[in-house]
Amino acid sequence: MLKTVVPYTSEIYGRAIVMPNLAPPVTTVEAAVAYRQRILDAVPAGHDFTPLMTCYLTDSLDPNELERGFNEGVFTAAKLYPANATTNSSHGVTSVDAIMPVLERMEKIGMPLLVHGEVTHADIDIFDREARFIESVMEPLRQRLTALKVVFEHITTKDAADYVRDGNERLAATITPQHLMFNRNHMLLVGGVRPHLYCLPILKRNIHQQALRELVASGFNRVFLGTDSAPHARHRKESSCGCAGCFNAPTALGSYATVFEEMNALQHFEAFCSVNGPQFYGLPVNDTFIELVREEQQVAESIALTDDTLVPFLAGETVRWSVK
């Protein structure tokens, strides 16, 4: 799988924040170094690509291990997955209090916290879990650790868009192409469910999609590209209990450009893709360039794996923008 999917990212992007939710998860410096090397081994010759590794937070994680990885340049950030919120998150955090020593250490050393922002209580509707997370977890956490730098990843609601826009300089957000292009009506069509649009956090109502589009179109500088690209073999998506995740790496940049064009906001596109993120992370902006052209590309229906296929985001459709 890795050798198939990495080139779709490395040919376009100079670097990427790599999620740690493997099985088993990336919780040590050694595991991150090994995973980074596997990624680099899958990068084709001629691609200039740097994977930025993250640490998977667990209730038992040693703060010293986290700080060592950050100081050695192995960990760029740490990821908080509420237990059982998404793919391979069973080892995730059961409560913020359980990892408070780790979070306090992160605040002290200036290490960014990346957050999958959903509560997982069975009695809370899946469409309400992001909004409830803000009020019950995110805001109390930020009030308690005021200097902690937080990225609210792949936001999906007007609640989150408003929260980030109204927040201070230590709070930012990423948004995926699927949450900008689609809402839950597209996924739950009368003609049949579209499993390749199923991801977590799940697509929401149209009013939330519009709020996300308006946020990126405004030129707000604390929101930036975050594809959350998640490849799963076709048989794992098209099943009675399918996996969550969209494999959007092949089409993400053209998809984002389409949204910015539709919103008459192409003047903000470069900052969203290439400037806002590095500035928030405290990283240098890349000094190399790619060129997008207003040229249609036909998206493949599928991508071959050894014993199955991948169905990319927008499979079989036409994207209006291409990387030259």
Image: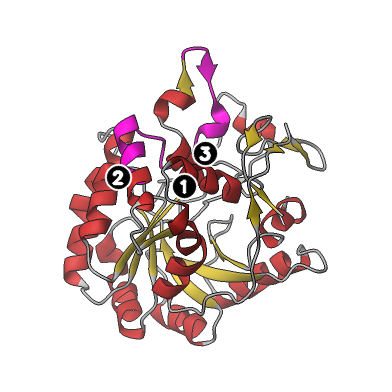
Q: Is residue 259 above or below residue 302?
A: below
Give coordinates of residue 47: x percent, y percent. 75, 67
Q: Closer to the camera: disc 1 or disc 3?
A: 1
Q: Residue 10: say if magenta.
A: no
Q: Amino acid at mark 1?
A: Phe
User: Which residue is the site of mark 3?
Assistant: 244
Q: Give the mark, 1 or 3, whose residue is nearer the N terminus.
A: 3
Confirm whether residue 223 shows in the render. Answer: yes
Tell me the element at label 2.
helix
User: Which residue is the site of mark 1?
Assistant: 260
Q: Residue 202: say if magenta.
A: yes
Give coordinates of residue 166: x percent, y percent. 20, 59
Q: CA distance from mark 3 to mark 2?
A: 16 Å
Residue 295 vs residue 224: left or right? right
Give coordinates of residue 70: x percent, y percent. 48, 81
Residue segment shown in magenta: 190-212
Tell me the element at label 1.
helix
Confirm whether residue 205 shows in the render. Answer: no
Q: Closer to the camera: disc 2 or disc 1?
A: 1
Residue 223 vs residue 168: left or right? right
Q: Give the mark, 2 or 1, whose residue is nearer the N terminus.
A: 2
| Mark 2 Cα shell of 10 Å, populated few (<14), some (14-19), many (≥20) | many
Q: Are marks 1 and 3 in contact (CB under 8 Å)?
A: no
Residue 130 is tagged as 2
Q: Amino acid at mark 3?
A: Ala
